[in-house]
Image (spheres, helix red, strand yellow):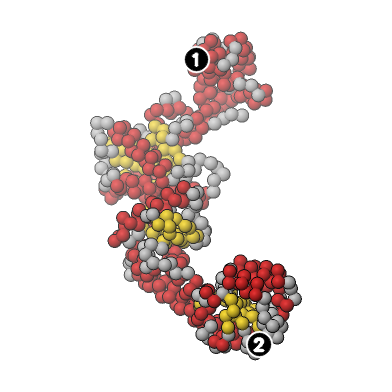
Amino acid sequence: MIKETGISLAEALKLEPLKSCEVIAGVMNLDNIITRVNIMADLEILNWIEEGEFLLTTAVHFGNISIEEQMDLLKGMKNKGVEAIAIKIQPYLKELDDELLKLADKIELPIIKLDYNISFADVMEPILKEIFDKQSKVIRRVEAIHNDMMELLLKGGSILDVTKDLSDKVGNNIIIKDYYFDDVICPIDHSEICLRRESEIDAYFKKHGITTKNNRTTKYKITLEGVERDIYAIPIIARNTVYGNIFLANCNSEIRMTDIQVLESASSIIALELLKKISIQEIENKYKVEFFDDLISNDKIRKSKAIERSNYYKFDKDADYCTFTISVGQNDTENMEIINRDISKVMYLVDSFCSSKDLVYLVANRKSQINIVFMLKDKKNPMDEVRTLSSQIEEMILSKMVNLKFIIGIGRVYNGIDNMYKSLKDSQKAVMASENYITSRIIEFDALGIYKIFCHADLKDELVDFYTKTLESLVKYDNKKDTELVKTLKVYYEANGNLKKMSEKLFTHYNTVLYRVNRIQEITGANLEDEQQRYSLQTAIKIMDMYGINK
């Protein structure tokens, strides 16, 4: 890969003044590629040399150290990536030790005997000029391809067009994996091959725990179609985030350094195109949110205008409607930038899913919630359609965003688009109810039972006050004494007050259960034999679960 930016030792030996020099070791390795020229001023050179160097020195340093030290020095140079050494042997030494020359042959490190009268500057100048010319050609090629891609996009080309053009230019099919929109882009003519390779790459990375979301170009060895290949993953970075990767494999021809540089240059252009696509999505969402807000507004004029515009979204005013609310990111410590990115991706996935199902729908988001309005087709069994849709959306999100935390709240079905806001309120209340006491990822508002009443925001203060006066003393006692009286009370209701069943459920002796029940009555001041007081405590438990009160 470095051939394009360096010259071989054989090419260097054809330049003045190296034409007259003799290769005294490593004569079988004249194809070593030189990308730099350096001078060895002292024995500390190993701290400064880099890969690809042609090292110039005198034998004065070799004359001051033992043959063992000379051999260690030579090995150190090879390990550092030195490609060749030119040494002025005389008048410092008569000849280099044969053992040193044999080692040079063995480790494939050419040694050139340099005439004393040749200056290092005269050696360096023509070699560096050749290297500079080659590197200039690489830069010009990268710049030309970069300009071609920019022109292609300015003429209305797509990322797919860029991908096809890049594949032609690098001589290997490339794959672009878009993590944001969960898309795979490859030339149409080779789509089946590319998709197969992309799945093989993904499977290999998954098997070996390799992340493709590195923020720098990464090389991997991978077996594709039974053959070991070099795979390069070039990141597509924007806003300090890896939005995708360009994958390049040496399937058709050798990968050159310019190929990598071309793709690294292309990645910035592709990143801009992805950001443009994201911006369009955000603008569309803005208009959808405005329509949504007008549709659920208490302002009759705003609402009526929204209903008039509903035809734009293919909504039938008299159809049945149901709203889903998807809450993304349930942890307050999560980074809002990450949550917002997850929300945008979920919206894109849901939008793509609904389009593929030919549904009449609208997706818009507010903060960490995504609201989806569906116009239902099934007049006889609308909830069957709703449950199928919710399951399919859940499965789709889980398959694409494995570690995402989300809840889907489902509102009731209402007739007429002017009543859609009721379904939205239901779905939002279902999400709120799920935050503390429901473990299911999909929650139907109609299935909440008495919790439907507790979901009303206007009642929260009264409900919390009721809990405080009824159950809080027992919760505080548990926290202070490290007891399980609240748990015992919950089991009391599960067992319908049957102490024997309670004993079995709690794995506790009957007398201990009886003692706990008496303590519960003493601490709360409630009589569990009294129906009203018994129901009050049970209601207070539901309020505690509903609002996550445990202190």
Question: Amino acid type of disc 2?
Answer: Tyr
Residue nearest the observer in this picture, 198 or 549: 198
The answer to which image quadrant residue 83 occupies is bottom right
Up-down: is 56 above or below 521? below
Query: Does residue 56 show up?
Result: yes
User: How busy is the neighbourhood of tag 1: few (under 14 within 10 Å), some, or many (20 plus)?
Assistant: some
Q: Secondary structure at mark 2?
A: loop
Estimate the x, y position of residue 231 in percent, counting from the top left: 44, 59
Q: Quadrant of the C terminus?
A: top right
Tell me the residue at 35%/59% (across/down): 186
The answer to which image quadrant residue 45 occupies is bottom right
Residue nearest the observer in this picture, 272 or 194: 194
For the residues labelled 2 and 1, the Cα–Cα distance comes to: 102 Å
Up-down: is 53 above or below 20? above
Residue nearest the observer in this picture, 245 or 76: 76
Q: What residue sits right under mark 2 in the picture?
A: 116
Tell me the residue at 47%/69% (across/down): 1
Estimate the x, y position of residue 491 in percent, counting from the top left: 53, 18
Question: Amino acid type of disc 1?
Answer: Ala
Estimate the x, y position of residue 449 in percent, counting from the top left: 42, 25
**Quick one: label 2 or label 1, which is nearer the N terminus?**
2
Up-down: is 133 above or below 512? below
Query: Does residue 129 show up?
Result: no
Q: What residue sits right under mark 1 in the picture?
A: 495
Up-down: is 243 above or below 369? below
Tell me the residue at 58%/76% (across/down): 25
